[in-house]
Image (tube, helix red, strand yellow):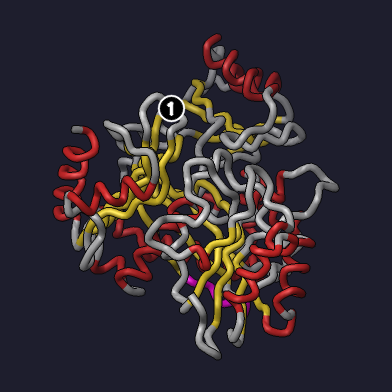
Amino acid sequence: MMAAAGDELLIVVANFQELFTVHGATPAIAGTPDQPPHGHVVKAVLWPDQPGWLLLAPAAPDIPVAGSCCHPPAEVIVPTGLGAVTLAALDEPVARARLTAFCAGAARVRIMATVHSLGLTWLAAALGADRVVGLPACPAGLVRRWNTKLGGRDLALAAGIPPDLMPAQAAMPSLDHALITLKDLRGGGRWLLKPNAACGGFGLVEANGGQDVPERLLGELRGRRTAKASWKSLYDMSEPLVLQQFLGERERNTSLTADFEVAPDGAVAFLGVAQQRLQRGFVYQGATYTPDAPWRMHSDMIVDIGQRLGARMAVERFQGCYNLDFLVTPDNRLWLIELNVRRSAPLDQFLTLRRLVGPNWMDHSAFDCHEAFPITGAVDSLCALEDRLRRHRLAFHDGQGVLAFHLSHRSERPYAGLLVIGPNGAAVDTIRRRLEDVLHG
């Protein structure tokens, strides 16, 4: 897609993982996003509101290099190979030609990234630094600190968030220290052991105060603490554990996730909030939203907390996306659980709905996102899956239907990332039931 003269283009850069790479490693444009790659090329095709967009992302074996068959190759730069995307977009002649052609004629190019890197500096220079905006100016070390459980809480307190809106927690310098502390909690109660630096709900262990941690959980936890860093837990062995108060009841709690963005001028925008679908109580598997959800009564407080945090980060020259996790307990009390200064999975849905429906999508639409929807039968490509949806009149059209954003064959049964959209919850439920008949039948 070529931009008309004077348009602003948006280049989405997935480089949060640069915070977790080895010091001194080759700077990357896109870093190493969560592994295995979950369709970053296709997943972001509808993100920005601007007339044009470009995504720098890793290639994945289950995604065509050109992205979905519905989107032209010129809109996607995918350097070959897995792992870190270094400066291939500038070094490879074909990729560089795509990049320069895409940006030709644009009056301004805005880069959406979480942390700065030498790769971004070189990218800006290649595009013409005088027309590039959005380069992160906040020190990467500070962003890294905010992305920990302890650092995020410190930031919330500095932003004026009342401590009684957050669960009690304490740093545990070692696993042995945490186990002794747990056993000494004579008042009992339920607690969570969390890695200070982690995401996606991985690495959490629930334990009871005043008791020994069961051998099964203890072995699992020790294994996690000694394992190499992985896409599941993002463990940093130099980080402490966090002992956090367990709130409410797992089966009756409502877990919410909200996204915001600090613009280059410091303005804070609210992008959306939804209920998380969690596996095994903590692991993210998707999100749902309906305009009449009971938890929406907390929307104003969620936006206020997000605005306060964003304003505080803007003081430190931060710009980019950030995410907040909340919990509504059975007594209908809202809690701020943690801050994630990075591109979150639900952000895909929020920006997709914003582009398809409009800025007021939360008043007019519902959605149900499945990160791992099981499929029966042979589906060898994302294009084949999209064709199957069209044949059964399930593909997104006229405000409702299904969008497919990734396909994986990494398990015995293939599964897909699917986003079901409708005007209300009832419509979404109807489409989902038809989808289950088609893909499970």
Mark 1 secondary-structure assignment: loop
> Is 409 rendered above or below residue 32?
above
Give the magenta part as a residue range. Answer: 264-269
Image point 17% across, 48% down: which residue? Answer: 429
> Is residue 361 rendered magenta in the image?
no
Please indicate whether residue 46 sits to the left or right of residue 433 in the image: right
Answer yes or no: is residue 410 visible: yes
Quarter of the image with the C terminus is: top left
Residue at (52, 52) in percent of width and height: 65
In front: 36, or 113? 36
Picture coordinates of residue 391, whole percent (x, y): 19, 51
Which residue corresponds to mark 1? 411
Seen in the picture, residue 437 relative to 223 is either above or below; the reply is below
Where is residue 408 drawn, in percent x and y? 43, 37
Residue 310: horizontal and vertical position, in percent? 57, 66
Q: Which residue lies furthest to the front in this view?
A: 94
> From what the image shows, is residue 408 above or below residue 65?
above
What residue do we see at 32% from left, 32% from top?
Answer: 251
The local crowd at label 1, few if under 14, some if 14 to 19, many if 20 or more residues have their Cα within 10 Å, is: few
In the image, what residue type sits under mark 1? Ser
Q: Magenta stretch containing residue 267, yes or no? A: yes
For this orientation, the residue located farthest to the right is 24
24 vs 78, nearest the viewer: 78
Residue projecting furthest to the bottom: 6
Q: Main secondary structure of the magenta part?
A: loop
Write down the quadrant of residue 141 in the picture: bottom right
Residue at 68 percent across and 83 percent down: it is 131
Q: In which quarter of the image is residue 317?
A: bottom right
Q: Quadrant of residue 224?
A: top right
Residue 369 appears anywhere in the view: no
Residue 118 placed where, x, y %?
A: 79, 62
